[in-house]
Image (tube, helix red, strand yellow):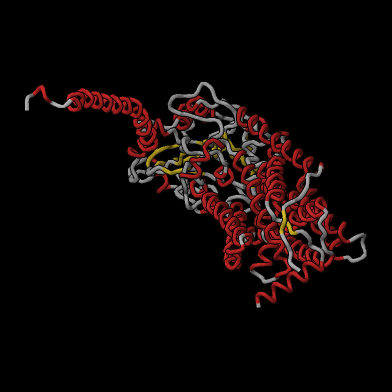
Amino acid sequence: MKPDQTPPSAKSAAPRASRRGFLGVAAAGLAGVMLAPGVRLIEIAQAAPGTPSANASSKVRWGMLIDSNKCASGCNDCVTACNTENGLSGGTRPTDSQWIRKIEIKEIRTGKTQSLPMMCQHCAEPPCVDVCPTGASFKRADGIVLVDKHICIGCRYCVMACPYKARSFVHEPQTNQKPDVPRGMGTVEGCTLCVHKVDRGEMPACVTACSDAGHGAMIFGDLNDPNSEIAIRVASYSSRQIREDLNLNTGVRYIGI
Amino acid sequence: MKITLRELQGTSPGYYLLLAGLALIALLGLGAVWFMEHHGHIVTGMNNQIVWGLPHVFAVFLVVAASGALNVASMASVFGKTEFKPLAPLSGLLAIALLLGGLTVLMLDLGRPDRLIVAMTHFNFKSIFALNIFLYSGFMGFVVAYLWTMMERRMNRYTPLAGLFAFIWRMALTTGTGSIFGFLVARQAYDSALLAPLFIALSLSYGLAVYLLVLMLACHGSGRPLGDALLARFARLQAIFIAAGLYFVIVYHLTNLYFTKHHDFERFILIEGGVHTTLFWLGQVALGGVLPLVLLLHPNIGQMRLRIAASAALATGGGFAQMYVTIIGGQAFPLVLFPGRQVSSSFYDGVVNPYSPSLPEWLLGLGGVAIAGLIVTLALKLLGFLPERLDDAAVQTGSTAQAAAGA
């Protein structure tokens, strides 16, 4: 058969095939262009909660030891530092978030007074994590209890469950947020132990502020490292957990209460 | 004589007025949600001390009443009281409607109701809240299946089985609802296994009360006869259920009064709690418990129907008061961080927390009630949920015929 005798159908098939091929490639390309950012977004979304955990090690148990004998009544430096570090307003209306607060305690019978900072106690058995329906309330491998703002639905069951009143609900739109500390209206939040600083090898803001004020009432460190200052102190002095009766094994311990 | 289920006939102005009224309240409720979602919970009376407010009072009442509304159907299919059989479809319908109304309020009061899909795809199975999502959807499924077996003649033989599953499930559901509070280990008001059976007893009372109100209104509105003997049986049941609720309330408070660590909380609720004390004694106990009991058990006060309707309304109102005291009162009493010591802070430690619900919260709660009402009102018009006649002769002969057929 001569080459010019190819049937008309076959003749036109070649360009049609290439047009089909082009359309296929174009469609695939277009799909790729359209899907890629989505896939990338999913990657980012999945990576976001995982990234810090990847750094967090279960060999570490971050904790804090607070000596209420050294804590000065009327000193609010830890609270101010927390507000500044985390972009909180510092307001004290019933609807305002307070991640750390100073509690004044008075013994009813003897009249003895004490002062101490109170925040999320970063329990080993956190009731907030138990009750959270979606798993947004979670504990990192290194013992830091956090809220995943992406899956918190704002049910406030954790606020009901926390024995320490350590959780706050964001009641209004937020502006001027800190890049390291995203917050969102309609979700729950609380002390993160300045996880963004801890992951950089720094101290939580409240601990630094207490030290700068000359009180040194707060020590931060790894409870699992026998050579750390906190572990040595916990081993040598009697320290207590607030609401020990609940057996929650808190990461924050107190001396002098 | 055979009892026929038939949809509401005719187009009375009263029916459409009711429908329009309910639709208006539901719309106002949705408007309130839009307002709350736009501005945040700052426009409600809720805060970081009272985190669950009036919407939860409405939602929990509706959910508890929903499981109780299934009582009448369970009486027929599970406990063999065949005279209640023609009343069972309305019972199932009411259970679904109340649950949907309650869940709507619960969902729309979330900080992020737009994340409903997250709640449906991320589960922490240690959370009783997460388990409740399955209990609610399962209840809905079982009751729909149950209604189907009742209303589709070919499926009638499966009604007892479906009824049994629905009954067991409703027990689990109310246990789950009570446990939402019972599992809160740190709060003086909760942290008690007693809350599960208490909520079951309350559900029986609330559910029957709402059922009676709807039944009497529907029969009155559509001109269908409702027998005295049937109502008298319901009255006895209602009295037993109210008494059961009161019994668990007494045991709950007696237990707390025995434990020294709970004395401050009991003093708060029973004596010094202001609105909570008033709502407890006047709303929950006197008007919601004792008065309806007297009305139901005393034969010589006024006309019977009026007494039953009044008792059902009182039990319903008392139920709202009880949920308010349970949910808001439980949060108003401060957490005890240092037993035996006074505490104070900028975060309202150690003080009784005040709460005044805002208009949007009222509208959202009432909107949930209206949604339940809309579902019932429309369903009664579209499908035969209500028997054509419920006079004593019809009910008696109907049940005798069924018993004979069953034998």
Which residue appears at 24% of the width and 23% of the height? Answer: A19
Q: Quadrant of the C terminus of chain A?
A: top right
| Residue A26 seen from this side | yes
Image quarter for residue B300?
A: bottom right
Which residue is at the far left?
Answer: A1
Q: Is residue A42 above or below residue B228?
A: above
Q: Is residue B317 above or below residue B70?
A: above
Q: Quadrant of the N terminus of chain A?
A: top left
Number of callouts: 0
- Residue A230 in the figure: left or right of residue A248: left
Residue A123: percent from left, percent from top? 47, 46
| Residue B167 seen from this side | no
Q: Nearer the viewer, residue B263 or A57?
A: A57
Residue B100: percent from left, percent from top? 63, 47
Which residue appears at 32% of the width and 25% of the height? Answer: A30
- Residue A220 in the figure: left or right of residue B127: left
Residue B126: percent from left, percent from top? 48, 53
Residue B167: percent from left, percent from top? 61, 63
Q: Nearer the viewer, residue B298 or B376?
A: B376
Q: Nearer the viewer, residue B50 or B175?
A: B175
Which residue appears at 76% of the width and 58% of the height? Answer: B388
